[in-house]
Image (spheres, grey):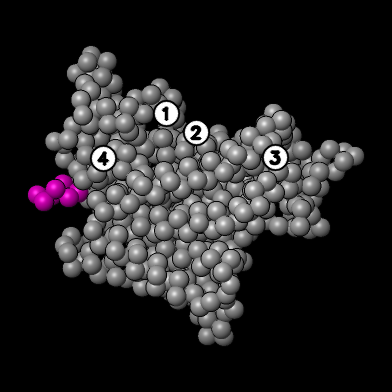
Amino acid sequence: MLSAIATTGFGTMASAQEAMTIDQQVNEAFAAATGPFVSLIFAPIPGTSFPWIVMWLVIAASIFTIYFGFVQFRFFGHAIGLVKGDYSDPNDAGEVSHFQALATALSGTVGLGNIAGVAVAVGIGGPGATFWMILAGLLGMASKFTECTLGVKYRNEYEDGTVSGGPMYYISKGFKELGLPGGKFLAIMFSIFCILGALGGGNMFQANQAHAQISGIVGDYPGWITGIIFAAVVFAVIVGGIKSIAHVTEKVVPFMGILYVGAALVILLVNYDKIGWAFGQIFAGAFTGLGVAGGFVGALIQGFKRAAFSNEAGVGSAAIAHSAVRTKEPITEGFVSLLEPLIDTVVICTMTALVITISQQLIVDPVTGLYTLNEAGSAIATVNDVSGVALTSAAFGSAIGWFPYVLAIAVVLFAFSTMISWSYYGLKSWTYLFGEGKNSELTFKIIFCVFIVIGAAASLGPVIDFSDAAIFAMAVVNIFCLYFLMGLVKKELHSYASRLQSGEIRKFKH
């Protein structure tokens, strides 16, 4: 995922090289300038340690779930049929298939958050955090459904067959249709935050973490070398546009997902006798805390935070990728997109949490049966005192000795896929602000690739914090607008559901 996890305790890995004095000066100046904005976005609710932005996302997901009548469960089977292509008319406008759109959006969310971020959540909130993570993921499916339906409904379709869509388009067009003021201003604000988030969290952080993981295995070497290699490969993919990106992501995302989940399943099968116990720890910890830092509330906060940071439901980024789909029914891409939090959070994040729990890397007091806290009392004590990505690596390595090498491959693939997806998100926000056209697009793509090299070579703490905040600032604008626009989605849902029931919506033979 994105750099959100850097703010939660494992960003130290990003400093693979020693920062030079000039770097420190730049970092300090940048931190001073952007600190208030970062603090505002991630400020806790008074009297708690719960970031208000997480509550903003979870409350919205709950409202959309109820408002649309638990759409994520009622239309789950239909969503699977759409991804398989059962209802796809090859003559519909758009650039990519339902599956390609889903893979592209998933490649932007499935990543380091699933590997390291979950370890942070379980390390602080205990196995019980997993329960709340799953719940938030299930609710988040309704947020994705809402924003991605609007993304297709209000996209721009051009004569050459290309399309542009996303929150900036549905905010400006939807507000105008409803006669509401401020749509253009809010769309511009969203676009600015999206570009900043794409260059930072969706780009520089990914390159930085990939270099740290590679140099950790092959030995230390200059980060700019990693940056140039990544920049060349990424540019080769993104210069071809969304079709080129989709062709890559439809192959990379299933491969990296199967690689990671497959390794997790091997460990679970080897320790099959502990699976029941692990689920017991998850459910008991969700409501009692099992003595972890912060108890029950600590588990809930960590679970909700991890889900929000991992699947980005409500951020609006995925709506940009899903807008490129070939369909004349906007609601169909809403159904497809709701699978995203399920795969990202409910399946992949849960796999990570189960492996960490079953591998018994978290130290338990043999007398009380409760988890032992570290010296600072801020997290659960672990074997060899590891946390974040190192905890995940140790958990897998306890059963598969060579897994750190697999993890290195996974991190590189996750970083690469996240970069190419976020290049598209940033590009569409860029062209919304500065106009469509080959020159405009090429300018942004070159800027994006230059930032890859900078990201791999520099120490970026404050930059990452700022870009992280920019990504969640997208959610502030997006969700505020979704509350005004969700009535339009409900009309689409009722219309499509009635036509599906009557047989007017039919399957296509391929």
> Label 1 neighbourhood size at 10 Å, few (<14), some (14-19), many (20+)?
many
Question: Residue 155 bears which disc, if any?
Answer: none
Q: Real-space Cα distance between discs 1 and 2?
A: 8 Å
Whether label 1 touches label 3, CB < 8 Å: no
For disc 2, the marked residue is: 138
Dot 3: element: helix
Q: Earlier in the sequence, mark 2 or mark 4?
A: 4
Residue 313 appears in view: yes
Q: Is residue 100 above or below residue 188?
A: above
Residue type of the residue flagged with mark 2: Leu
| Residue at (40, 67) in percent of width and height | 230
Residue type of the residue flagged with mark 3: Ile
| Residue at (79, 54) in percent of width and height | 374
Dot 4: element: loop
For disc 1, the marked residue is: 72
Furthest toward the top, the residue is 502
Q: Real-space Cα distance between discs 3 and 2?
A: 24 Å
Nearer mark to the viewer, of 1 and 4: 4
Q: Quadrant of residue 68?
A: top left
Q: Is residue 484 above or below residue 72?
A: below
Residue 314 appears in view: no
The part of the chain drawn in magenta is 157-163
